[in-house]
Image: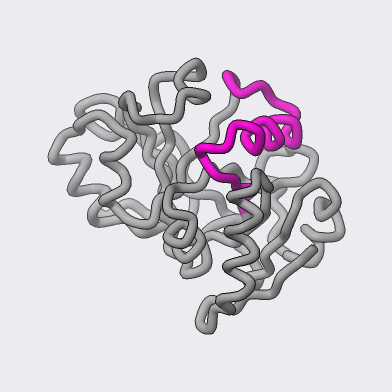
Amino acid sequence: MILKIYPDNINDKFIDKAVKTLKEGGIIIIPTDTVYALVCDIYNNDAIDKICRFRKIKLEKANFSFACSDLSNISDFTKPFSNEIFRLMKNTLPGPFTYILNANSKVPAIFKSNKKTIGIRVPDNAITKRLILELGNPLMVTSVHNDDEYLDYLSDPEEIEATLGEQVDLVIDGGPGSLEPSTVIDCTGQAPILIREGKGVLPE
């Protein structure tokens, strides 16, 4: 099923349907400020397993991220980090960046056997933010791309529905997506390190 949601005039009933699907363990495809993403509730283990099967990858080898509604959510799941890293995030979020941070004990147990770090996103997208706020906690996110080919991203929501719709519970059409993924920055040390250049441009 595909739901058309306009970012500047969000349909409350469609958001309610998407949130209900997430709470029931569904996996859905949503727009972000970069590429379309496959998402689920971070606290639903069955949904996380579904995404792993969808991506044909074991959880311990996956590079999934948490999408938060704002900076205040980040400290819920990460260990303390330097003022330099905080200033960088404050200057770039919400925005097309993924920050790799050291995870704390509040990260759901299913991720703890995976690794000691977690990717954090705060997408600058009204639909994504509304879903997170209505769900009440972050989303687990992973980029949607075709046949797992690197950078072969799907940007047309109708093509996404035609190609992947039968494998997910819901597709949200929020308009054309970007073909550029987020910029990834490793912040597990004292100074940030650029891992992947993407849509996000770092301030000088």
Q: Residue at x 69, y 61 (%)?
A: 155
Quarter occupied by residue 151: top right
Front one among 77 and 181: 77
In the figure, 24 relative to 174: above or below? above
Residue at (43%, 36%) from the top-left corner?
119
Q: What number of labels is visible?
A: 0
In-image side of 101 versus 57 (left or right): left
Q: Please state the horizontal and vertical placement of residue 130, each as a whole percent of the image.
A: 47, 66
For the N terminus, give its image quadrant. bottom right
The image's colour scheme reads one colour
82, above or below 158, in the image? above
Q: Is residue 83 left or right of residue 176?
A: left
Relative to residue 91, is residue 198 drawn left or right?
right
- Confirm whether residue 27 shows in the render: yes
Residue 22: where, in percent of width, then height? Answer: 61, 51
Magenta span contains residue 58: yes
Q: Position of residue 67 (x, y in %)?
A: 45, 48
Q: Is residue 175 left or right of residue 71?
A: right
Quarter holding residue 101: top left
Q: Residue at x 81, y 62 (%)?
A: 159
- Depth check: give the residue in front, 149 or 19: 19
Q: Which residues are magenta?
A: 37-61
Residue depicted at 81% across the width and 55% down the height: 165
Residue nearest the viewer, comparing 164 with 203 = 164
Farthest left residue in view? 83
Task: Tell me if I can see residue 179 in this picture.
Answer: no
Of the pair 66 and 93, the residue shown nearer to us: 66
Q: Note whether 197 is above or below 130 in the view shown.
A: above
To which quarter of the image does residue 77 belong? Answer: top left
Q: Position of residue 39 (x, y in %)?
A: 60, 47
